[in-house]
Image (spheres, helix red, strand yellow):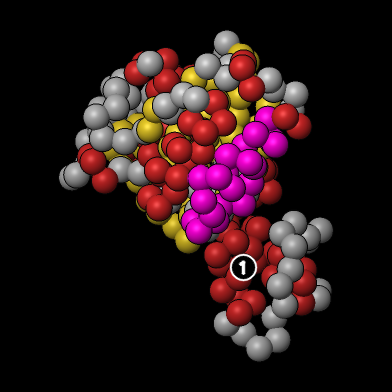
Amino acid sequence: MLLAIDIGNTNIVLGGFEGDNLTFVARIATNAVKTEDEYATKIRSILALHEVEKTSVKGAIISSVVPPLNSVMKKAVKIVYGIEPLMVGPGIKTGINIKCDNPSTVGADLICACVAAHHIYGSPSLIVDMGTATKMMVMDSGGAFIGVSIIPGVNIGLKALASGTAQLPQISLEAPASVIGKNTIDCMRSGVVFGNACMIDGMIDRFNEEMGENLKVIATGGLAPTIVCHCRHEITLDDDLLLKGLKILYEKNK
């Protein structure tokens, strides 16, 4: 089994691949102050929950946007499985060109998403990753990553709305029955869910206009299922895009 680990600002996503099959996906909260022993315990417990034998894990790959956890997670994997995980970063073979001002600063999560989108769905394409931040990445017809737009994430906006006002509460994120809210909670849900859907639709139009063609759009990230179903463009939802990208990168670099 290949263990793929994506360390995000809010959650750490773990996935296990048997050949090309993704056999399980699990999430734990990101905590930059936990030690390698604590993460080793969590990883071992989660894989045991999914009936994964310790001896079956033969390789591991990690992407991270939380630098303090990079060495911690590598040590945690080595403690549990005795293997040295591959880390997504400068020098890794990606199979795609990165046409940015400073390619070494492109986040590991962006690289994983773009690699997977290019190999699975083809290029040109627009990838929408809705996590702590909403990232919209463009691949040109030659399969090169040419840039990204980074937008405050859905939950960041929701928390700012509640914490920055005196009378608006913290709410759960789900779509109301109507865009015209009749009570405080539905009013907030309308703005957050439908407002973000409209923002994505509008950004897709601008990307298409600038690229001179209609790009295929792939969405991923924990908040994507809640939002993109309300968009008016055709969008392919792939919850496991980053994990698939990690597997592709592992195969290219093992």
Q: Which image quarter holds the N terminus? A: top right
Residue at horizontal 81 percent and vertical 74 percent from the top = 182
User: Where 196 falls versus 58 (above or below)?
Assistant: below
Asked whether 40 falls inside the magenta stretch, the response is yes
Q: Quadrant of residue 74?
A: top left
Q: For the residue labelled by badge 1, is the local secondary structure a helix, a strand or a loop?
A: helix
Q: Which image quarter holds the C terminus? A: top left
Asked whether 205 falls inside the magenta stretch, the response is no
Q: Which residues are magenta?
A: 28-47
Residue 110 shows in this picture: no
Residue at horizontal 71 percent and vertical 72 percent from the top = 170
Q: Residue 41: x and y, percent?
A: 63, 41
Residue at horizontal 76 percent and vertical 32 percent from the top = 49
Q: Quadrant of residue 214?
A: top left
Q: Amino acid at mark 1?
A: Leu
Q: In the picture provided, is 206 more to the left or to the right than 219?
A: left
Mark 1 highlights which residue? 158
